[in-house]
Amino acid sequence: MVAKAVLLKEIDSLPPRYYSEVVDFVTYIREKKIKENNSLERAAEMAFEEYNNNKELTAFSALDGEDFYETR
């Protein structure tokens, strides 16, 4: 992985005509990251609703709090 300081130095050494391309690329990467985070967040919200409301998935929740290793 290239160190941040090295990348910044390389960007600084670019001719000014390339600055807009660098800005466009960084903007694209930021937007992509935001979209990925939002889609993961939405997927987690959907899974949460499903696990809370689907009786097939919550059938064993009646056992919550039971000591699994307790001898009888």
Image: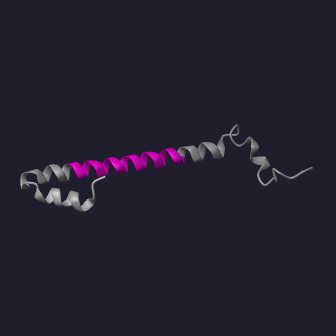
In this figure, what is the number of numbered marks?
A: 0
Residue found farthest to the right: 72
Q: Position of residue 11 (x, y in %)?
A: 16, 56
Q: Position of residue 70 (x, y in %)?
A: 86, 52
User: Along the horizontal axis of the image, is 65 left or right of 17?
Assistant: right
Q: Where is residue 52 in the image (x, y as percent from the top left)?
A: 65, 47
Q: Please check the rendered image and state whether residue 49 is part of the magenta-colored stretch, yes or no.
A: no
Residue found farthest to the top: 56
User: Along the horizontal axis of the image, is 48 left or right of 23?
Assistant: right
Q: Residue 57, located in which quarter of the rendered image? A: top right
What segment carries the magenta color? 25-45
- Which one is nearer the viewer's eye here, 34 or 21? 21
Q: Please check the rendered image and state whether residue 32 is part of the magenta-colored stretch, yes or no.
A: yes
User: Along the horizontal axis of the image, is 59 left or right of 31?
Assistant: right
Placement of 39 over or under 67, stated as above or below: above
Which residue is at a point 11% across and 58% down the rendered structure image? Answer: 13
Task: Report the magenta stretch's main SS.
Answer: helix
Which residue is at a point 81% across and 50% down the rendered structure image? Answer: 68
- Which one is nearer the viewer's eye here, 40 or 12? 12
User: Along the horizontal axis of the image, is 23 left or right of 65?
Assistant: left
Which residue is at a point 74% across and 47% down the rendered structure image? Answer: 61
Which residue is at a point 50% across and 44% down the rendered structure image? Answer: 43
Q: Position of residue 41 (x, y in %)?
A: 47, 49
